[in-house]
Amino acid sequence: MSTISIPVTKTTQSKLSETDFSSLVFGKSISDHMFVADYQNGAWGDFRIVPYGPMEIYPGNATLHYGQAIFEGMKAYKNEKGEVLVFRAEANAKRLNESAARMCMPQLPESVFLEALKQLLSLDRDWVPQGKGSSLYIRPFMFAMDNYLGVKASDSYRFMIFTSPVGAYYSKPVSVKVETTYTRACEGGTGEAKAAGNYAASLYPALQAQKEGYDQLLWTDGKTHSQIEESGTMNVMFKIKGNLITAPTHGGTILKGITRNSVLQLAKDWGQAVEERFLAVTELEEALKNGSLEEAFGVGTAATIAFINKINVNGKDYLLPEPKPDAFSTRVLSTLDSIKYGEVQDPHQWILTI
Ligand code: COI
């Protein structure tokens, strides 16, 4: 594969020495450089890596008004040899293009995505924290660049990648509330795209739940609010009577989570029974009442596995015990970590070594 040419302008004021790697807060520290590409006249070009910093856009920028913006989230880890390992980069490159198609945005060649990532991470490899629990969060994203107020798909776009050293997303198990008023996604909408607007729409309902003392929501379907779809910004899984249950992604309302896919692959490898089907709120409530709900956890890039310790259904709180060391969620988290940090063989070629 021919490598694309990416001119680099290095920073003259690295923030590395002033970054406290021992107390990383998710998304607060940003690494020194960013990748930028512009789409104009039907083609991507002007590839460059430059110091991370502000950029100029017109007040009439279409993204600010009509929200044509999509993003990805992925992570890089450092192994004991100091090599940088990126988890499932190709899957992210593919999903970005699926989101782009739904949002009327141009396809970005996967080779550009991957080459940009490799060159950016090579340059900023000192920003990848070493040690379990920490990683470099990678944020690729694309947005409209037309300076035009008519409502239409933009003709010009920008694609960028920047990175941020991070610690754990959630420091403890999370409490969730089944949401039956507001909706994250509905059939025919943009739920399966990683579109910025989906996250904007989730903020108000999430804030209401937080005011009531819950960390996040368990989203239900938009039509009947009778089936569980996702949790907060993550996919969600339940283990009931030995079966792992998670919502299917073919209906267009559920994000095709890469962590979700990885967990399901490991479940298959281990012979764990999986049901990709919607879990009814009534079934969840029943399982909470009769004690057959063994585990509940969110799965996403930022948190990997977020153990759920409290679920509110129809106004009543149910507590879940802490997952045991042999619980599926505990084992899957530890196996994923071992693969990501290069401690064990990578059975599905998920790792890209930089
Ligand atoms: C993820 O965990 O996959 C996310 O997208 C979370 C991000 C919005 C912080």
Image (spheres, rainbow, N blue to C red):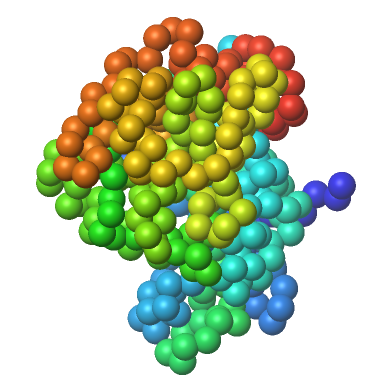
Q: Position of residue 162 (x, y in %)?
A: 50, 48
Residue 91: image quadrant is top right
| Residue 305 picture location, percent across and down | 44, 28
Identify the residue at horizontal 73%, vertical 53% (top origin).
110
- For the C terminus, the quadrant is top right
Q: Nearer the viewer, residue 160 or 351?
A: 351
Q: Report the side of 221 relative to 109 (left or right).
A: left
The image shows residue 6, relative to residue 64, as above or below, that is above
Q: Position of residue 108 (x, y in %)?
A: 69, 62
> Which residue is more in the foreground, 328 or 302?
328
Q: x, y percentage for residue 226? A: 37, 51
For the view shown, which residue lies furthest in the top direction? 325
Residue 228: in sight, yes or no? yes
Q: Is residue 46 left or right of residue 58?
A: right
Furthest residue toward bottom: 150
Q: Is residue 62 above or below residue 242?
A: below
In this view, 99 is above or below 263: below
Nearer the observer, 282 or 51: 282
Can residue 82 be seen here? The reply is: no
| Image-quadrant location for residue 96 | bottom right
Residue at figure coordinates x 41%, y 49% from the top left: 227
| Residue displayed at 46% across by 25% down | 239
Question: Going by the image, does 165 lie left or right of 35?
Answer: left
Q: Residue at x 69, y 81 (%)?
A: 41
* Number of numbered discs on residues: 0
